[in-house]
Image (cartoon, grey):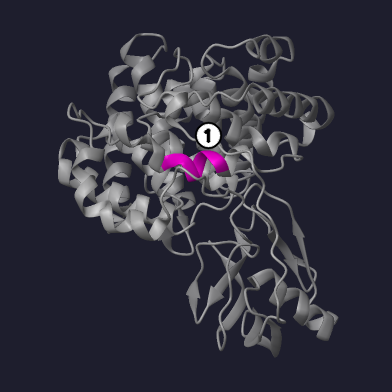
Amino acid sequence: MSSPFLYTAGEMRPSHQLRLLGLLLFSLIPSQLCQICEVSRENCSYLNPLVNTMVNANYTKGIQSANILLTFRLVQIQNQRLEQQLTQQIQEDIKKREPEITSGELALAILALGACKNSSEVFIRDAHLVSKLGEKFKAEIENMETHSDNPLTNYYQLSLALLALCLSNGNHSITNVIPYFTPENKNYYFGGQFSVDTGAMAVLALTCVKRRIEKEEIEADIKDLNKTNIYITSLVNKILSAKNDGLFGNIFSTGESMQALFVSSNYYKNKRNCQETLHTVLHNIFQGAFRLPIAAAQILPALMGKTYLDVNKNCSCACSPDKFNISTDKPVPVTPTISPSNISVKYSVQINKIFNSTKVTVRKGSVFLDVMMAAQKQNKAAFCFEMEDSPWGPYITSVQNISANNNDRTYWQLLSNGQPLSQGAGSYVVKNGEYLEVRWSTY
C-alpha cells in the first residue's frame, strides 16, 4: 500500500533530509529537557508526513478513528472539518453498537471525545459512557476469574480501560484491580515475548492511579501505593530491556513506550538517549514506515512531548499549527508503462504439526494478504481464511475454520522465514523467494 501523503513543494525529499540528520539531531532536542524527548519548535516540519498521513486518509469506520481524533486534539492540529467528521462518526458508532464495542474501544473513544476540554464532554456524560466502561471493565475482570486469568479481550485493552476510568473518575474500585497488573502476569507476554506496547499502556494506567492515590483522590493505603510503584518500576525495566537502536520493541510500539518513559522514568534526562530515539524514529518517518493513520497517530504525541495523561488539560504544543505544512492533495495514481513483474513465494499453514504448503505467484509489491488470497483460490479447503477490519488493517481471525480465542489464548501468527512479523497481513510487502507462514499459536 502506498503512502497516503505527498511531499509538498516546500519540503526536501527524504534522501536529502537523511544526509542532514547527523547535523540536526542535537538541534531537535529541546534545550530544557526534563523527562521528555520532543522535537523542537524549529524542526516541527519534520513531522509533516505524519500529519498529512492522518489528514488525507479516508475515515469510515467510526470508533476505529478514535486514535486519530485523540492525537489531533492532544497535539492541537487545527482541522475543524476533519475533527467534526471524526467526532460525529465516533458518536454515531457508539449509539449503534455500544453493547458490542470492546472495553478498549470504548476507553479510547472516551479519551478522544473528552480530550483537552471540548464540547464532546456533554456526549460522554449524557450517554453514560464512563459507567458503561466500568461495566465492561468489570466483565473483563470476571472473565479472568473464571477463565484462567484471561480477559475477554487482552491486557492492552484492559490497561486502556483502566487508564480511561482513572482519568474520568470512574466509580469502579480501581485499587482492587491493581493486583491483576503484576508484571509477572502471563497476559503481558505474547508468543513468549514481553509485549512492549501492552506494558507501556499499563505503565500509563498505573501512573494515573498512583497520582490519584498521592493526591488522595482515591481511597487506598500505603500498601496499594507501594505495590503500584513496584509494578511501574518493573514494567519500565522490561520496556528498557527491549530497547534496540533507540526503539522499544519495534517502531510501532515505540511511541507509547516513549510516553510511558516520560511519566515514570528519568531515561530521557540523558540527551544521548533522546538523540538515539529521535534519529531512528525520524529515519523511519522518512522511509515511509507510518503509512497507516493509526501508526502515525500513535507516534506523534510522544514526538511532541505529549502523553495520554494530558487529556484532561488545556492542550498546547511547542509545534504550533502554523509550523505544519498540511497538504490536502491526494496522491495521483500512476499508470505503469509496462506490466509489473511477478514474484514467487512459498506459503504454508501450520496447525500443530500438520503443514499445508504451496507455491504462489503474485505481482511485485504484493502484501501478505495477497498471498493468502492467491493460495485460497488454489485450494480453498487447505487455505481458506476469514478476517476482520481493524485500525491496523485486516486481522486474521480464522484459518481452515479454526478461530482465534482469547479464553484459550490462541491466535494466528504471521511469519516470514520463520520469524514473527511486526506488521499485519495488509501491510507487510512480500519479497521474491520468501517463505511465508500462518501458524496456529498460543500466547
Q: Main secondary structure of the magenta part?
A: helix
Instruction: Return the x and y of residue 409 as percentages of the image width and height.
Output: 60, 58
Q: Is residue 177 above or below residue 413?
A: above
The quadrant of the image that shows the N terminus is bottom right
Q: How many numbered marks, from 0 up?
A: 1
The local secondary structure at tag 1 comes to: helix
Residue 51 falls inside the magenta stretch: yes
Q: Is residue 378 above or below residue 274?
A: below
Res 219 → quadrant: top left
Residue 181 can be seen in this image: no
Front-most of residues 396 and 378: 378
Task: Categorize mark 1 by other alpha carbons within 10 Å: few (<14), some (14-19), many (20+).
Answer: many
Segment tinted magenta in the rendering: 47-52
Instruction: Return the x and y of residue 94 as percentages of the image width and height.
Output: 76, 27
Front-most of residues 198 and 61: 61
Instruction: Return the x and y of residue 182 as percentages of the image width and height.
Output: 39, 41
Q: Is residue 201 above or below residue 419?
A: above
Q: Amino acid at mark 1?
A: Leu
Q: Which residue is mark 1?
A: 160
Front-most of residues 256 and 1: 1
